[in-house]
Image (cartoon, grey):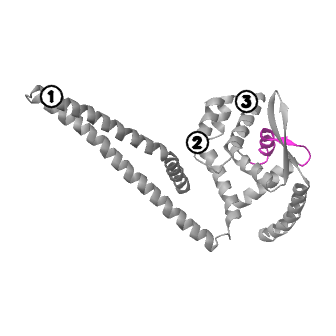
Amino acid sequence: MDIQLKKGLLDLMVLATIKYEDSYGYKIIQEISSVMDISESTLYPILKRLEKQKLVNTYNTTYNSRIRKYYKINKQGLEKLKQSIDDFDEINRMYMYIKR
Amino acid sequence: MNKKVFLNNLKKELKYYKKINSEEIIYYYDEMIQDAVDEGEDENQFIKNLGSIDTIIANIVKDEDFVRDVKTSNTKSLGNIVNGTVRVISFICYYFALFIMTIVFGSIFISGLGMILQSGIYLIFDNLTSTDQWILFGVIIMGLGISIIGFSLMTNIFKTTKSFRLFIIRKTKEIYRKKR
């Protein structure tokens, strides 16, 4: 798949993963890998990017007496997700046109 | 490779990249490995599946470049260019001076060694009066002193250029990665 396209999709995949429940690195990978291939080294830049773009907030909690970083989607993140779904509707119409 | 070795190697490699927040990355992988182990995965196998440290860093660098490119585009004003040129020229002058100094100190070191060697040969192979022998002995001591001075000056220069050498290594690695 085209790299730029995949990059954009992965951002959305991560946002969708934490849409209903805050999550952490390992769990996010477990969930996404059921749909598409993602490695640990790919996820880090994505999380970093989402954080920089202020689409997610982060907080630390203690688990098994160690620190775990959780990612929480915020208002802008939800908006971005909603907007992308509208985009997909448009892409889908284009896809149907290409495919006919 | 276990977690400790892996994180250590990663930290060592990340040192070459000033712009990357290496501490954050170490935390990320530390947490990831511990979570995997808690879920019953084999530590060594999991680390093996993470891929090579080179790939890990390449993924980060690619993205940092991406973010930086977006940030710095359209900021090439005249002031920046002049500033950049001046910086490059002074940079070159500085390292040229250091280079010359290394050569000078190196030759001091070598000439000291030469004095020791020459006097040593005279002492061993020539039939000399005891006065001459004492003089040559003095020359050897002098040679020793000169070579020590040359050597320590040279090592000091090497210490000063440590950041420069790290910079060269970093750049070479970057070029190598881009080529691949």
What chain is tagged by disc 2? B
The label on residue B31 is: none
Quarter of image, res B106: top left
**Could you tell me which secondary element the residue under label 1 belongs to?**
helix
Residue underneath mark 1: B133
Magenta range is A19-36
Identify which residue is drawn at 90% across, 43% down. Answer: A21
What's the amino acid at mark 1? Gln
The label on residue B41 is: 3
Q: Are marks 2 and 1 in contact (CB under 8 Å)?
A: no
Residue underneath mark 2: B13
| Residue B163 belongs to magenta span | no
Specify the farthest residue to the bottom.
B78
- Circle 2 or circle 1, nearest the eye: 1
Identify which residue is drawn at 73% across, 40% down. Answer: B28
**Could you tell me which secondary element the residue under label 3 belongs to?**
loop
What chain is tagged by disc 1? B
Q: Are marks 3 and 2 on the same chain?
A: yes
Q: Position of residue B140 (x, y in %)?
A: 23, 32
